[in-house]
Image (cartoon, helix red, strand yellow):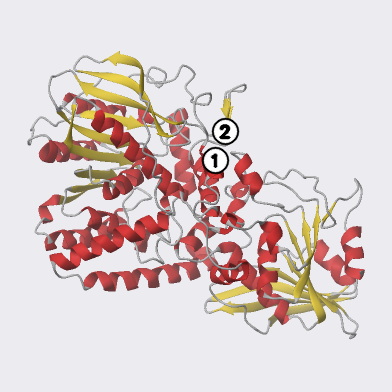
Amino acid sequence: MRFLAGLILFAMALSAQPFNDQPFNKWINSVAQRQLATRKERIRQIKSRADAEAHQRTVRAAILDVYGGLPNYRGPLNARTTGTLDAGAYKIEKVMFESLPKYWVTGNLYVPTSAGKHPAVLYAIGHWNEGKPAAQRMAANLAMQGFVVLAFDPMGQGERFQGYWSRAGVSLVTPGVPQHWNAGTAAFLINQTLSAYFVWDGMRALDYLTSRPEVDPERIGCTGCSGGGTQATYISALDPRVKVAAPLCYMQSFEVLFPGSIGDSEQSPPGFLSKGLDQTDYVELFAPKPWFIGSTKEDFFTPAGAKVLYEEARNFYEIFGAQDSIKWVVGPGGHGTPIEIREGVYEWFNRWLNNGNPNWKERPVKMFTNEDLRVTPTGQLAADSRDLIEILKEQRTSRPVSGTLDEFVRKLAVVEPGNAKPVIESEETKDGLLIRKVKLSIEPGVTVEGWILRPTSSAPLPGVVHVERTAKLSARAIEIAKAGSQVFAIMPRALPAPPRYMEHGDWEAATRAWLTGRNLPAMRAIDIATAARALDATGPIRGVADGVHSVALLLASRLEPRINRLWLERAPHSFAPVFDSPRHLGLHDAVMPGFYTRWDLADLAQGRQVTWMQPTDWNNNIIHLPGPMYRYRTFDEMNEGIIRWLLE
């Protein structure tokens, strides 16, 4: 049942609400498709082997750049074997090794009982909570065909749950995708990526695999399905020890993937498309070595997307005279590995790594339980291994961004706030207020909605920009207007957010934005700043926001200096708590790649009059902090404080 739960969780994470129902998605897709078209035109210019090899050098550098580099630890693996299972023609060793100091990886090593050096396969695991047992059928068959196979647990799955509470026997964060989101957004804050750590685990797994006396290090393959297909793609392209690759149920061109089932943190490094990359580049980087692509007809990683990738990659292989070294197989059914795909992989690895062994048809295997395959006594590494968040905390300043804070903010925003005039959609007079529903054009293709409210008197009024989170005008914005202000209640782009996984923030909008080199809180800051400029108000502009959306308001105050008095309600006060807990809420709405390498949220408040009412950490806990910037309300106090603040 846990196996099914893990698969359903991943499928739900990738199944977006109808894409065309969201104006933001249509606009950001147009940005992505322009970037992909520019890349495709560059690919068309590759005609010779020299051109192709130059492209490979460029691609490798670009991928490592968007990953934020890779760890460079070369210390001992400190490998252990904790038990062995006898399956007759092969045995399964329960192994563990260190990827980084005190950061352990658990795996199952399938070893044929025949003598001599064997070819080997690294099997990366997809988003199944059980981890390595998901590889058992394929790994066992490969072992019976003469391969040594290492199936290892990814971070957040199998025996590597993060934030594991041993007393209760549960993780504080749902295993799988949510654990990847938590670590991934934290990594982005310090100018790193989860992709790099996933790849590094794979490279260290190869260190272990090639150290085994049964393994021929010159005959190494790599495979995996779903999220394991992601890892197999990355590891194969970046580690030259992999001679044959077979990623399954993953490979797509972003031409099709981007407006469809967008992936999670390790599948979506910031700037990937804006740096001129597509998934096809991984295959082309691997050329002319053999590459197998497995798809299924009803997968959310669609055959249509795989077809675009395969056709370009095959043309690239032809430049090397190696068109027979790339193959694409489409099997029946949904997300997974039907026997047509499994046997395609067996045949591929045997052809290229095992002297063309013809005995690759699948056979029944002894299936051990998940508990049988455990490496640790409890099924979790919690007592022995550090969480990745602890390593990221140590790495905060290892890749600092350059420039001043304001230079960083403007680079993050990409475009400057405009001076657009609001277009009135409707208006009404109610309870002494003139309320106008308006639209505001921000940049080509982007229009946001909101309301402009003011008392019916014609006297000059102070201006307030109020950040709305839903499609309904808030009672607080009305109350602020009644107190004698002109209010632009703005609903920035990509709001209201879809309800799925709201505790993680708007992960879909954030992910699509950062893939294209844009940033969600910075784009919302542009919307807020443009709204502030649209107010016909005297003097400075006040700003009001709640929770994680306070980050966008702080950024807006750096883009539009007139916004210099801010009221932040129950807002996170610092990014530091992100690295003190494996769990955090809403960070997708606030993450700025590289920001925390040099600054924190209080730095954005410098030079502004900021009231941080009920400041919080990233789990919505109110934190008591010293200093006049931080205020706390009594039990029954509602909006009295903000009204007094307006009148100051």
Specify the quadrant of the image occupied by residue 515.
bottom left
- Circles 1 and 2 in contact, beta carbons < 8 Å: yes
Disc 1, SS? helix
Q: Position of residue 321 (x, y in %)?
A: 9, 59
Disc 2, SS? loop
Nearest the viewer among 220 and 489 is 220
The amino acid beneath tag 2 is: Gly
Q: Position of residue 207 (x, y in %)?
A: 29, 35
At 59% across and 48% down in the image, what residue appears? 504
| Residue 452 vertical placement versus 354 (above, below) | below
The amino acid beneath tag 1 is: Ile
Specify the quadrant of the image occupied by residue 149.
top left
Left/right placement of residue 99 relative to residue 644 reads left
Q: Nearer the viewer, mark 1 or mark 2?
A: 1
Of label 1 and label 2, which has the lower sequence position?
A: 2
The answer, for residue 421, to whether it is visible in the render is: yes
Give the residue at mark 2: 163
| Residue 18 vertical placement versus 102 (above, below) | below
Give the residue at mark 1: 389
Q: Residues within 10 Å of mark 2 (few under 14, many from 20)?
A: many
Left/right placement of residue 481 relative to residue 600 reads right
At 48% across and 38% down in the image, what residue appears? 176
At 53% across and 42% down in the image, what residue appears? 178
In the picture as drawn, the residue positioned furthest to the front comes out as 75
Nearest the viewer among 109 and 187 is 187
Q: Position of residue 154 (x, y in %)?
A: 41, 36
Q: CA distance from mark 1 to mark 2?
A: 9 Å
